[in-house]
Amino acid sequence: MQLVFLLLLYSNIRIDASINFIFFIKIYKGGVCLADKDLIESGAEDTWSEEEELNGIVKKRERFEKLMTKSDNPWGLSPKALESKKAAMTMLSTKNGMFAKVPLVCKGKVCPYESTCELLKYDMAPVGEYCPTELAQIDIRAMGYSSDIDINTASFTDKNLLSELITLDIMLERCKALLAKEGTPVLDMAIGADREGNEIIQPTVSKAWDAYERMSKKRDSVYQLLMMTRKDKIKNQKDDEQAVSLSDMMKDIINMEE
């Protein structure tokens, strides 16, 4: 393609009395094209910036989709975070992994349950570590409940209910410790003062007792969901017997017709 000539056209044109245009026009054999604009109208500039922004978003989306399709790292974690996640998965897959956040960390003499802690009395409380008493309670309950619901064949839902059940048991033990410290479920609480400035005392149910009642009801509901009480087992047995009786009746009717 041969360049015939380059015409530099300087045009100072006012549009809407505000915008100046300067164009470089290159004329080629076979046609004329506009190029090398020093100043372009604002509408074209906005269109160009929108296209650049759209292209950038498309590239980000493609990178995101590529990242999400990776089976080994769908969350886009760093190498350190990946190893930490693997460690967490190992912890949660163990027998006591589900209950890792339940036990308290021992605070020694400043523990709110220190008045009932036998280990603290014998200077055996491991300050800064998980409470040994609660760890023992978790292990005992985990073993007992696991045999009740046959943990090896239990569904994921049943295992989650078991985790909640053990958590409620531990919370109930903490309420018992507070009640033992208070000595009574009814406390005299100051609810105000009279005109002379004397406190007005009114018997009030302990917060620890109130929490104990609430969690007891919650635990009973979990028992029912897992069908672990004697009442649930008797009901299931009766339902099975009724089902068997109905089946026998149907068999007798069929035999009589034959």
Image (spheres, rainbow, N blue to C red):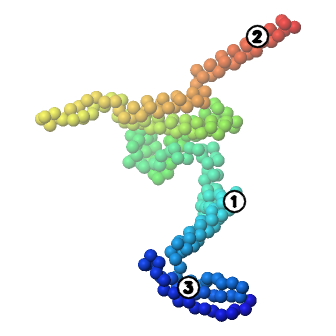
Which quadrant does the N terminus fall into?
A: bottom right
Indicate the position of residue 234 as horizontal and vertical percent values.
62, 19
Which residue has dot 3 on it? 23
The residue that appears at 65% across and 21% down in the rendered structure is 236
- Which of the 4 image quadrants contains residue 76? bottom right
The residue that appears at 47% across and 53% down in the rendered structure is 128
Q: Is residue 76 visible?
A: yes
Question: How many numbered markers are drawn?
Answer: 3
Q: Tell me which numbered mark, 2 or 3, is placed earlier along the sequence.
A: 3
Indicate the position of residue 133 as horizontal and vertical percent values.
50, 41
- Mark 1: give few (<14), some (14-19) or many (20+) Cα within 10 Å: few
Which residue has dot 1 on it? 70
Mark 2 residue type: Met
Q: Is residue 69 left or right of residue 119?
A: right
| Inter-mark Cα distance, 2 to 3 | 100 Å
| Residue projecting furthest to the top | 256
Which residue has dot 2 on it? 249
